[in-house]
Amino acid sequence: MYIDTHAHLYLDRFDQDRDAMVARAQDAGVKRILLPAIDVPSIHQALALCEAHEGMFAMAALHPSYVKEARPADLEQVAAICDHPRIVAIGESGLDYYWDRSFDAKQQDYFRWHIRLAIEKDLPLILHSRDKKGEETVYRDLVAILKDEREASGTPERLRGIFHCFTGPRWLADTAQELGFLLGIGGVLTFKNSGLDVLVEELDLAELVLETDAPYLAPSPHRGKRNESAYTALVAQRLAEIKGMNVQDVAAITSANAARLFNL
Ligand SMILES: [Zn+2]
């Protein structure tokens, strides 16, 4: 059994064949799917999918790239919906220095707010971070803010979650472990020359969970096409090759890691 810990299945790229796509995931052994939010409407779309499908769970947050136009009223709505029984995490939140650097300060403010919310609600926090190729500024800022908020909270042990779409560097994996976070491994692992295979070989499977980030970042041989949750199995297959293990063990260990984190 696999758990896809990160899939945006509510997006309109699945409108034509969503039920068939979910059935393919089931057939591929992907029995649980977690749906990170990007904005307030997406939280409601994710919850509607949870109603319609077995084994789906939603998250609540404003994605850093959607923070630019966001207002405090949006944060109030995120906070209000967190107590819904199908909301199992705060996500995805974090920092994105790849697309637009014109509102870094607002991204950082909103990120801090999400960390505090996750601690207050005692829910896992799903982190997004992206920088220009070769740049690590976003990771340094993200970790500094996480540590700062963790110190400031009276309950640092509540802070936990996933570095979603983890691609390195090595020091970030070590820091994640130090902070009690897992690493979300997706399609990038199957890309030639990503270098992620070399890094993942050194990491303990106890720190890893599987994800697709569907519809983005499809693993090979579907690279460049629409991603879907069934392809979690392809990521697991590659991980099993790298670790020299059988895929059933990879599935069992990564699923147990995710189930424990999300309390599924
Ligand atoms: Zn995402």
Image (cartoon, helix red, strand yellow):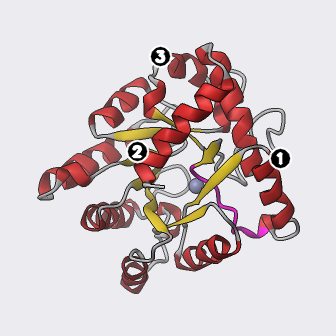
Mark 2 sits on what residue?
Answer: 138
Left/right of residue 156 with respect to residue 74 in the rendered view: left
Among numbered discs 2 and 1, the one appearing first in the sequence: 2
- Asked if residue 130 can be seen in this view, the reply is no
- Label 1 Cα neighbours within 10 Å, binned few <14 / some 14-19 / many ≥20: few
Quadrant where the N terminus is found in the figure: top right
The part of the chain drawn in magenta is 5-12
Left/right of residue 2 with respect to residue 91 in the rendered view: right
Mark 3 sits on what residue?
Answer: 202
State whether label 2 is within 8 Å of ligand 1: no
Instruction: Name the chief secondary structure element in magenta.
Output: loop
Between 30 and 17, the one nearer to me in the picture: 30
Percent across and percent down for residue 169 are 45, 28
Q: How many numbered circles are shown?
A: 3
Give the alpha-carbon distance from disc 2 to disc 1, as whole Å. 27 Å
Percent across and percent down for residue 28 are 78, 43
Mark 1 sits on what residue?
Answer: 225
Q: Nearer the viewer, mark 3 or mark 2?
A: 3
